[in-house]
Image (cartoon, rainbow, N blue to C red):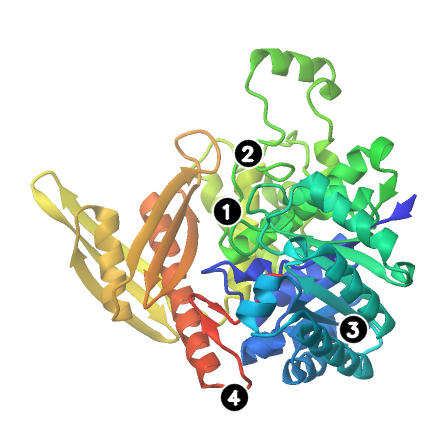
Amino acid sequence: MEKIFIFDTTLRDGEQIPGACLNPREKLEIAFQLARLQVDAIEAGFPISSPGDFEAVQGIAARVKGPTIVALARAVRKDIEVAWNAIKKAEKPRLHVFLGTSDIHIQKKFGLDRDKALERGLEALKFAKSLCPDVEYSTEDASRTNPEYLSRVVEQVIAAGATVVNIPDTVGYAVPHQFGNLISHLKETVSNIDEVVLSVHCHNDLGLATANTLAAIENGARQVECTMNGLGERAGNASLEEIVMTIKTRKDYFKFQTSVNAREVMRTSKLVSRLMGMPVQANKAIVGANAFAHSSGVHQDGILKDRATYEIIRPEDLGITEHAMILTARSGRHALRDKISKMGYDLDEEEFEGVYERFVSVADKKKRVYDEDVDIIVQDMIFAHLAGNKLYSLESYKVRTGNSEAPEARVRLRREEVILEASAEGSGPIDAIFRAIDKIAGAFHKLEDFQVKAVTETKEAIGEATVRVSREGHRALGRGSSTDILKASAKAYVEAVNRIHFLLEHHSQTCGSDNGSVVQGTSRAHNTA
């Protein structure tokens, strides 16, 4: 079967979600996992946007082997130089240059005409080609571009040395039949189209990103740009897991294959969700909590007789393990280690002992510890190791409340070797905890969203709290887990405060740099291709 190349842009387009700013260590951890997933290319970032992103891309290029490592650049000489310096030590580097081709982009963004825009793009491409043999050229907003002009641009950038040409549906405007026809038009009208890999990059503003991508594949596209969990600008990008599993499940129809190791899909999804602080909706295709859950009696009866009656994908193929082993406080280290291994985690002795200590604490409070509980415990340990640059950590809290008095919380946070303490009243115990944390931080954080849910059934279940806060135009999300929902909420709020601090620090560094970067809203300078 012919291969479809999977270009993952979780670390670039996916990270452009407000509040989802990753530090270099977190980006590197995700990049390692994407390599285990066996994607063909990893777009590591937009190096010109900030010193932090340059550092992250450079670290990924130096250490991650297997996939092509891609850096994004505008059609600007300085962008391209910085991008090349970030990835030049990669095993397989690629420069990715973009420039708008639609009239609205050419005229409104650049104040140019079509000929001048093409001239600028070709000049940038040739400079990129002088630095790196593998250069991808993106025709930003291609789905709203005049088809004849688009064919002209594509033909000339191929002649100038592009190895991959990308056709983005930048604002999610296309519909499948139309987008498929656009790809077919390019295949028919561009004389040298077979000299490059034709790529597509679809956004999900109308909920059609995956459908548009599959339509493009049917009409000749051979690289797809996508993100884990469908993350990305605005409504997100085409979802990697949806595209890969559609091709795999419906090979009778698509007649293609990918190199992706599907058994790493769920592990990758959870890692990205955890580190970005972006929960996956329960009914999300492929990786949602309910994707393989059955509550209807008719469905349950069918599943017990033959799973194929209501499941077209085997959970095991995605790395979702069977829930046969029941873990309790008496299970011991061997049983826990076996469960963790079957879930796809590889922990060293120190990491395992940290997980085991937390497991025993949870198991003492519960009759049964579910796989989801173990997953949360392991993910918490992983995040704690990655968050080495966090500002505060929760040391302890105490709440006094009752029917006839205002709730009061006393919170202690650790900042390096210093213990900081504050008390505050609130409309409820959680509000009081949040206010006390704000006192310690010396800043007010507006609470925009707060949710608490049980990870599993039973009253002793681990509770997972999610908070979204904003401050000075920046938003961040924090998550915390514990069998005590007040503690889970406090941990989540502290994590959100740490992320806000990181964003503000990052914003200050970016605005103070002289590399031409611009911070817009809660993210760094970026494009939407």
**What kind of residue is marked 3?**
Pro
Give how far across and how far down residue 234 sits, in percent.
Answer: 51, 53
On residue 279, the disc is: 1
SS class, disc 2: loop
Q: Nearer the viewer, residue 345 or 437?
A: 437
**Label 4 with label 2: CB-CB less than 8 Å:** no
Q: Is residue 114 left or right of residue 353?
A: right
SS class, disc 1: loop
- Give the mark, 3 or 1, whose residue is nearer the N terminus: 3
Q: Is residue 379 left or right of residue 127?
A: left
Q: CA distance from mark 3 to mark 4?
A: 25 Å
Give how far across and how far down residue 408 sits, in percent.
Answer: 16, 53
456 above or below 225? above
Q: CA distance from mark 4 to mark 1?
A: 35 Å
Tag nearer the camera, 4 or 2: 4
Q: Is residue 247 left or right of residue 500?
A: right
On residue 514, the disc is: 4
Q: CA distance from mark 4 to mark 2?
A: 44 Å
345 above or below 514? above
The residue most toward the bottom is 514
Residue at the image point whose x is 69% and y is 84% from the top: 81
Q: Nearer the viewer, residue 316 or 74?
A: 74
- Give the mark, 3 or 4, whose residue is nearer the N terminus: 3
**Label 3 with label 4: CB-CB less than 8 Å:** no
Q: CA distance from mark 1 to mark 2?
A: 12 Å
On residue 93, the disc is: 3
Give the position of the N terminus as an image quadrant. top right
The residue under label 2 is 283
Q: CA distance from mark 2 to mark 3?
A: 37 Å
